Image (cartoon, rainbow, N blue to C red):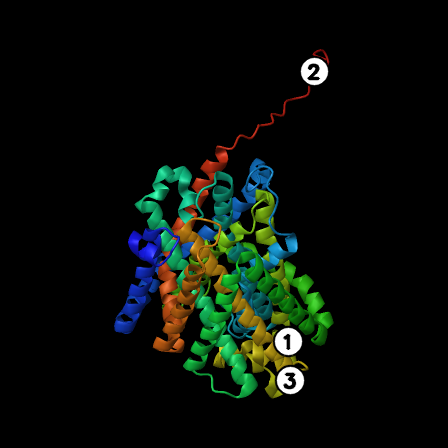
């Protein structure tokens, strides 16, 4: 393999590079040869994971959040992620836009309208009447639970572990480096390499889900704007074009391409947010932002630990009911690309303290997500009609968005903009935002996968980085081509199964971090009782 790597002019760990590439090709080949058998295997695997270990996913994310809060508030919070005199590489604004655009920007554009409307029209909890005031509040609580603090917890924990061990211990830029206190030199052996290969595969397939969602939404938008039929080939073409854009950003590098695209994209997203706020029900939405804070934190303790234990008593006979296809899938999907987001965030966070890192990565994106859902979600539900009286006054127009979401989830955002001025212009603007979010997710993931292979922060050869960018687009494109819309459903089955070992891997980062932090030379301050008067 060394000779082949030299012939291809690669600068990489040959075992990790060729093992990950080979397994990726093997999986795609198996999908082509026996898609039905592979699909059935992963479908049964997903059912077993959800039924028997769904509780483990839900409990685990809460444990991670508690650990992060503890470490940020502890005596270790002031430790700099790097050498003592290291300064941050990026200013606060660029730091925020890069971690956000490289994170879940595509997901927010996809679900900003669709998820609140889905829960509003079909409430998750028993006894809640669809389209009622209670249903609207529940819809907002569930949407924020799925994409707020808990999602960013899944990114922050590995991000902190990577930043600490890579920048402070000067270890290779690999997932295996996180386990140095537990494995020591074993991180360079078969166990360490297996960890890195698993992280690469999880990243590739996890990002492929996001790329598939993004291409579906762009295709729905173009179909709405131009009247063209939304076909499988259109979605594949979109993936091909935007993969080329991502590759251009990859060639430009982290400081030029990714930073520029991220800053442009977050600016456009904020402009879209302000447009909805100003041209929509402004007073209603401003009040909604304030009230949503209370709804979120008021419901969070119960939602965070709710795992549908009484679903077995439901007439449907399902073992997990609603949460199996929502919360458990979200956590399994998110954790598959947590190595990518974690390493990416660690790369752009050198020089920041542990406290600054945890609070920044947890709170800043979560606050933006809350505002995003409060504006798009409440406006969408008001358009649909909240409460029996409002819906009766609206007549046949009540439930328009719910019907649009039921027909096509990717079309939700564009159906939403039909109720605003400059509809065509804004729909086109939204398509561009999704497209750039698509590109930033792809180029960020490609750069991180390249780092996992080289073990270095400096970029590998251009053609090596381009290879991973093309690989991500190819995975998403082939799955859509093989099964159309069902291709993404099949990938969701795969993600849930792959998510389990990666979830366990991230869990083990906690004892590794505790052991590493415990070795820090930090003086303990002993507080004694006041001296007695006679002692003075």
Residue 14 visible here: yes
How far apart are the two marked residues, 2 and 3, measured between alpha carbons? 77 Å
Q: Nearer the viewer, residue 493 or 85?
A: 85
How far apart are the two marked residues, 2 and 1, measured between alpha carbons? 68 Å
- In the displayed structure, 456 sits above or below 472; it is above
How far apart are the two marked residues, 3 and 1, measured between alpha carbons? 11 Å
- The residue where tag 2 is placed is 532
Please tell me the numbered disc located at residue 382: 1
Q: Tell me which numbered mark, 2 or 1, is placed earlier along the sequence.
A: 1
Q: Residue drawn at (47%, 87%), measured in percent from left and top? A: 229
Report x, y in % for residue 423.
Answer: 64, 82
Decide if residue 254 is on the left or right side of residue 196: right
Q: Nearer the viewer, residue 23 or 229?
A: 23
Q: Tell me which numbered mark, 3 or 1, is placed earlier along the sequence.
A: 1
- The residue where tag 3 is placed is 394
Mark in the foreground, 3 or 1 = 1
Q: Dividing the image into 4 quarters, which one contains the C terminus?
A: top right
């Amino acid at each position: 393999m060394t000779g082949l790597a030299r012939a291809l002019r690669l600068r990489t760990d040959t075992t990790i590079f060729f093992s990950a590439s080979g397994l990726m090709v093997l999986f795609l080949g198996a999908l082509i040869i026996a898609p039905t058998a592979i699909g059935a295997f992963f479908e049964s695997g997903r059912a077993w994971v959800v039924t028997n270990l769904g509780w483990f996913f839900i409990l685990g994310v809460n444990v991670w959040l508690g650990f992060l809060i503890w470490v940020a508030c502890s005596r270790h919070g002031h430790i700099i992620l790097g050498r003592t005199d290291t300064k941050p590489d990026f200013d606060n604004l660029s730091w925020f836009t890069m971690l956000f655009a490289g994170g879940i920007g595509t997901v927010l554009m996809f679900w900003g309208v669709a998820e609140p409307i889905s829960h509003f029209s079909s409430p998750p909890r028993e006894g809640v009447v669809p389209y009622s005031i209670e249903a609207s509040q529940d819809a907002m609580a569930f949407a924020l639970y799925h994409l707020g603090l808990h999602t960013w917890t899944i990114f922050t924990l590995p991000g902190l572990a990577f930043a600490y061990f890579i920048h402070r211990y000067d270890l290779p830029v690999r997932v295996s480096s996180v386990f140095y206190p537990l494995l020591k030199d074993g991180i360079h052996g078969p166990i360490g390499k297996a960890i890195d290969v698993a992280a690469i595969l999880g990243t590739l397939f996890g990002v492929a889900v996001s790329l598939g969602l993004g291409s579906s939404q762009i295709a729905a938008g173009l179909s709405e704007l131009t009247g063209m039929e939304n076909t499988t080939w259109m979605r594949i073409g979109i993936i091909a074009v935007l993969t080329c854009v991502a590759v251009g950003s990859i060639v430009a590098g982290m400081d030029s391409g990714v930073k520029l695209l991220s800053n442009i994209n977050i600016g456009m997203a904020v402009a879209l947010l302000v447009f909805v706020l100003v041209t929509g029900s402004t007073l209603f939405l401003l009040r909604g932002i304030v009230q949503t804070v209370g709804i979120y934190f008021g419901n969070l303790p119960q939602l965070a630990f709710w795992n549908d234990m009484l679903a077995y008593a439901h007439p449907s006979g399902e073992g997990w009911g609603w949460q199996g296809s929502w919360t458990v899938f979200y956590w399994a999907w998110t954790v598959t690309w947590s190595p990518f987001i974690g390493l990416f965030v660690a790369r752009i966070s050198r020089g920041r303290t542990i406290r600054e890192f945890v609070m920044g990565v947890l709170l800043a994106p979560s606050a933006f997500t809350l505002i995003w859902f409060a504006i798009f979600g409440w406006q969408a539900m008001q358009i649909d009609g909240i409460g029996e009286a409002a819906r009766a006054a609206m007549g046949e127009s009540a439930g328009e968005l719910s019907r649009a979401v039921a027909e096509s989830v990717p079309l939700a955002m564009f159906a939403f903009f039909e109720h605003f001025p400059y509809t065509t212009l804004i729909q086109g603007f939204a398509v561009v935002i999704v497209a750039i979010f698509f590109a930033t997710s792809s180029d960020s993931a490609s750069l991180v996968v390249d780092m996992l292979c080289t073990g270095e922060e400096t970029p590998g050869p251009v053609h090596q980085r381009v290879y991973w960018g093309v690989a991500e687009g190819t995975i998403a494109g082939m799955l859509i081509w093989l099964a159309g819309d069902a291709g993404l459903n099949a990938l969701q089955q795969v993600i849930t199964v792959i998510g389990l070992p990666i979830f366990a891997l991230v869990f083990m980062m906690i004892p590794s971090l505790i052991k590493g932090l415990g070795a820090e030379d930090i003086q303990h301050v002993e507080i004694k009782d006041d001296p007695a008067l006679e002692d003075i």
